[in-house]
Image: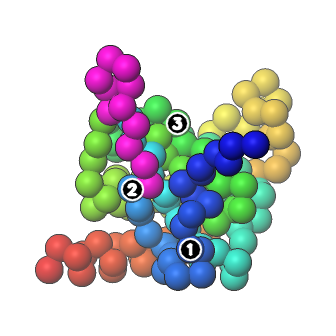
Amino acid sequence: MNEIKVESFSLDHTKVQAPYVRQAEIFHTPKGDVITKYDLRFTQPNQEIMSTGAVHALEHFLAGFLRAELQGVIDLSPMGCRTGFYLIKLGQASEAEVAQALIRALGKVLEAETVPARSPVQCGNYRDLSLFGAKEYARAVKERLAERYQAAKS
């Protein structure tokens, strides 16, 4: 049987330093379009795992807020390991540009009073959303990303 290569499985999760934004893969469509996948890591793999309610609420928030902050967002999906998200974007942006968009989006999470799309009509698991958890991760990740990407500018 042929082994299928999955980019994230080749990442040494013991060596990364979360939080971060990492350009994971670039795809070229047959028509020449560029699609880029980013790893938006919130917590340290195998050390801190986000609760499903927090991940789910952040997914709801960031699905909209990142689209408002970054052109060409196709999808935002939570990682199964619950340490972050994958962002799929039409075209390319630098890691710093994506990080700045994420920082702005997380700032909007901190200002929110309710989780969007939290009804049984809009969501398949509407009872498992944690506004408190989303804000806790948004606060921590926003601060640490701001430090990291401000230092990179200097």
**Residue 107 in the figure: left or right of residue 95:** right
Q: Nearer the viewer, mark 3 or mark 2?
A: 2
Local SS, label 2: strand
Q: Quadrant of residue 107?
A: bottom left
Residue occupying the point 28% across, 61% down: 96
Please rate how many residues cluster around mark 1, counting C-alpha atoms within 10 Å: few if below 14, some from 14 to 19, many from 20.
few
Task: Residue 147: give x, y in percent of width and height.
Answer: 33, 80
Q: For mark 3, what is the residue?
A: 75
Q: Amino acid at mark 3?
A: Asp
Q: Which mark is residue 52?
A: none
Q: For mark 2, what is the residue?
A: 23
**Residue 16 in the figure: left or right of residue 3:** left
Q: CA distance from mark 3 to mark 2?
A: 15 Å
Q: Nearer the viewer, mark 2 or mark 1?
A: 1
Q: Nearer the viewer, mark 3 or mark 1?
A: 1
Local SS, label 1: loop
Local SS, label 3: strand
Q: For mark 1, what is the residue?
A: 12
Q: Quadrant of the C terminus?
A: bottom left
Q: CA distance from mark 2 to mark 1?
A: 15 Å
Q: Which residues are magenta?
A: 24-34
Determine contact: label 2, label 1, CB under 8 Å: no
Task: Residue 86: give x, y in percent of width and height.
Answer: 54, 50
**Residue 60 in the figure: left or right of residue 19:** right
Residue occupying the point 43% across, 49% down: 25
Q: Amino acid at mark 1?
A: Asp
Q: Relative to the observer, which residue lies in front, 149 or 88?
A: 88
Q: CA distance from mark 3 to mark 1?
A: 24 Å
**Residue 103 in the figure: left or right of residue 136:** left
